[in-house]
């Protein structure tokens, strides 16, 4: 796994150099439970990662690790988003970041925001987490593809799904409607708990907003105690799937700004 990661990083460093850029750090966005301070991935079921300790450096660059939903939310925050937000980030798995008063709420153990494992139906299908009827079983990529009757290779499935939806295929539209309803049901619980100014749909699912939002909005209107639920309080991230990547870059930039005299900036070069 680590060698694949290094290979990927080497390609990116090479591309940056061609453009005359000098990489000064790396941040890894992980779809799972992460102890960022220790570069430790507790669990990322969709990657098959479990209790994985990542090094402090990658190709000689300082490496930081965080949850991808958190990084997506940071990117939104830094571009001037609301200070109290539930930021949903979904593709293979479903995660959320809670931003409270302009800061990420990570919880006592760093596990906050695991929206994908909020129960939608307590007696529903078994989930990889060991419980039943979790949101991911209704709105996760795998569940949506199965409901849509699509068996796609694991390459950019969301974009392909969007094309099928654009073509108006009834089974695909019904699957997305069901996913939107499940997302809205789970989010209504989160909204009633933390009273955010806005709910933002980010990650790859931002590309499916056109089909997911109506069901999400309907459930929020019916279940959230904020009445009437304001239309503008449910939006799609303009950053889409680039959000977590931008957030990851911003983490490195902030680290450099906090410590401009760091060895990396003073001229240490990562190996090519
Ligand atoms: Zn679960």
Image (spheres, rainbow, N blue to C red):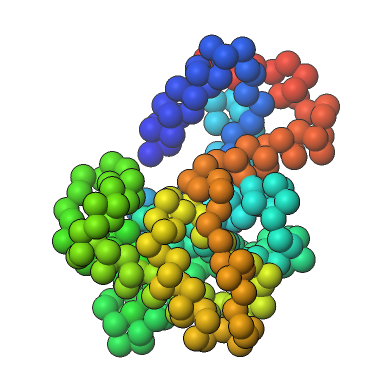
Residue situated in front as seen by the camera: 60 or 14: 14
Labels in figure, total: 0
Q: Is residue 81 visible?
A: yes
Examine the rendered structure and indicate whether residue 250 appears above or below residue 208.
Answer: above
Task: Provide residue 208's location: percent of width, then percent of height.
Answer: 39, 56
Examine the rendered structure and indicate whether residue 147 appears above or below residue 26.
Answer: below
Which residue corresponds to the image point at 16% horizontal and 53% vertical from the top-left? Answer: 151
Task: Provide residue 92's location: percent of width, then percent of height.
Answer: 36, 55
Quadrant for the N terminus in the image = top left
Task: Provide residue 3's location: percent of width, then percent of height.
Answer: 40, 31
Which residue corresponds to the image point at 55% horizontal and 31% vertical from the top-left? Answer: 58
Which residue corresponds to the image point at 20% horizontal and 64% vertical from the top-left? Answer: 170
Task: Provide residue 193's location: percent of width, then percent of height.
Answer: 62, 82
**66 left or right, relative to 212:** right
Residue situated in front as seen by the camera: 264 or 227: 227
Q: Is residue 40 visible?
A: no
Which residue corresponds to the image point at 64% horizontal and 51% vertical from the top-left? Answer: 76
């Amino acid at each position: 796994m680590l060698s694949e990661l290094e290979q990927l990083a080497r390609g990116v460093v090479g591309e940056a150099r061609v453009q005359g850029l000098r990489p000064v750090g790396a941040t890894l966005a992980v779809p799972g439970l992460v102890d960022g301070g220790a570069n430790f991935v507790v669990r990322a079921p969709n990657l098959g990662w479990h209790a994985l300790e990542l090094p402090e450096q990658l190709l000689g660059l300082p490496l930081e690790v965080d949850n991808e939903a958190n990084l997506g939310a940071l990117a939104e925050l830094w571009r001037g988003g609301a200070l109290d937000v539930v930021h949903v980030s979904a593709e293979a798995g479903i995660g959320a970041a809670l931003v409270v008063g302009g800061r990420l709420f990570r919880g006592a153990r760093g596990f906050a925001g695991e929206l994908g494992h909020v129960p939608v139906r307590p007696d529903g299908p078994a989930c990889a987490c060991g419980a039943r009827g979790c949101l991911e079983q209704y709105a996760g990529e795998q569940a949506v593809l199965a409901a849509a009757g699509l068996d796609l290779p694991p390459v950019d499935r969301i974009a392909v799904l969007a094309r099928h939806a654009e073509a108006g295929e009834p089974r695909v539209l019904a699957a997305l409607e069901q996913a939107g309803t499940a997302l809205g049901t789970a989010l209504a619980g989160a909204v009633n708990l933390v009273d955010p100014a806005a709910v933002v749909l980010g990650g790859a699912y931002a590309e499916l907003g056109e089909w997911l939002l109506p069901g999400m909005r309907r459930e929020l209107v019916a279940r959230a105690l904020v009445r009437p639920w304001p239309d503008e309080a449910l939006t799609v991230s303009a950053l889409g799937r680039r959000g977590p990547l931008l957030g990851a870059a911003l983490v490195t930039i902030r680290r450099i700004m906090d410590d401009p005299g760091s060895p990396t900036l003073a001229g240490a070069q990562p190996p090519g």
